[in-house]
């Protein structure tokens, strides 16, 4: 099973600031099959990024994904009030899909 | 409108069984891989299982292998999760989700399963 470790656990930022979230895999992810999700309290998750850097339908361009092999990054270029949430990474390069533990982006 | 509506959750004693259902509408169910993902209260997301469009391929997280069975009825646009030998650590909200074989593009609102004596 591929273990995904997200950092930091919590990110305290102000609206308008840039957020950089990291996810490290315990082994290389095949074909960069890597996704990012956003989850707000009481809601189901929402897909943001797939294949490491492709934005999902309807996702604003302030969200971007990058990385390869074992190190992946989600960047939010300027935080909007609605972006404060928990973010999860996920790999689907192996038969056992796995999620990271999550990064909470909170208002400073 | 795309809808995934889970049902069948509830409280069960350790060792017991439950069958979750997920009624799908608003998209091509027969062309979608389907997944179950769970989330324990206050915790992160955990992938549980997935099934191929025609039901010919399934796989499971190690934590549920041999105890849970995923299935689908394409004629009814319904996904199932049969859960046997339930343990306290299976307590979670169970989400039905659709996508490709890997990433997930749509989620239900979830159904809560509580395993407790």
Image (cartoon, coloured by chain):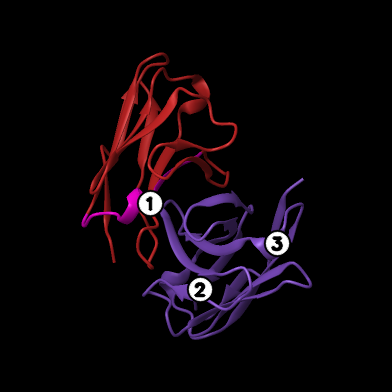
Return the x and y of residue A56 as percentages of the image width and height.
53, 38
Kindly tell me whether residue A101 is visible in this rendering.
no
Image vertical order of residue A48 relative to residue B15, above or below: above
Residue located 78% across and 71% down the image: B76
Please give the residue where the numbered disc 2 appears in the rendered image. Answer: B115
Foreground disc of the pair 3, 2: 3
In the displayed image of the protein, which residue is found farthest to the top? A16
What residue would you read off at disc 3?
B29
Element marked by disc 1 = loop
Say which element carries label 3: helix
Which quadrant of the view contains residue B65?
bottom left
| Magenta segment boundaries in residue numbering | A26-39
Q: Nearer the viewer, mark 2 or mark 1?
A: 1
* Residue at position x 29%, y 54% in the image: A29
Q: Colour of chain B?
A: purple
Q: Quadrant of residue A107?
A: top left
Quadrant where the N terminus of chain A lies? bottom left
Where residue A103 sits: x, y (%)? 34, 39
Residue B93 horizontal side relative to residue B30, left or right: left
Q: Does the magenta-highlighted stretch encompass residue A104? A: no
Foreground of the two, B67 or A64: A64
Q: Residues within 10 Å of mark 2 (few under 14, many from 20)?
A: many
In-front residue for pair A94/B39: A94
In the displayed image of the protein, which residue is found farthest to the front?
A: A31
């Amino acid at each position: 099973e591929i273990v995904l470790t997200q950092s930091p656990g919590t990110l305290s930022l102000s609206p308008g600031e840039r957020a950089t979230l990291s996810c490290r895999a315990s082994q290389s992810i095949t074909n960069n099959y890597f996704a990012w999700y956003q989850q707000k309290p009481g809601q189901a998750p929402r897909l943001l990024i797939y294949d490491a850097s492709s934005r999902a339908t309807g996702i604003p361009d302030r969200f971007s994904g990058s990385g390869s092999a074992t190190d992946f990054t989600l960047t939010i270029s300027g935080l909007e009030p609605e972006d404060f949430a928990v973010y999860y990474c996920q790999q689907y390069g192996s038969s056992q899909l796995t999620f990271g533990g999550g990064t909470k982006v909170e208002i400073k | 409108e795309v809808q995934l509506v889970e049902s069948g959750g509830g409280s069960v004693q350790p060792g017991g069984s439950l069958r979750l259902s997920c009624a799908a509408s608003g998209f091509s169910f027969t062309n979608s891989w389907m997944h179950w993902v769970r989330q324990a209260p206050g915790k992160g997301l955990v992938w549980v299982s997935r099934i191929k469009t025609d039901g010919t391929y399934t796989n499971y997280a190690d934590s549920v292998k041999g105890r849970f069975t995923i299935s689908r009825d394409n004629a009814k646009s319904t996904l199932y999760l049969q859960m046997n030998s339930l343990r306290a650590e299976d307590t979670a909200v169970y989400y039905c989700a659709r996508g490709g074989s890997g990433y997930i593009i749509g989620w239900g609102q979830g159904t809560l399963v509580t395993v407790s004596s």
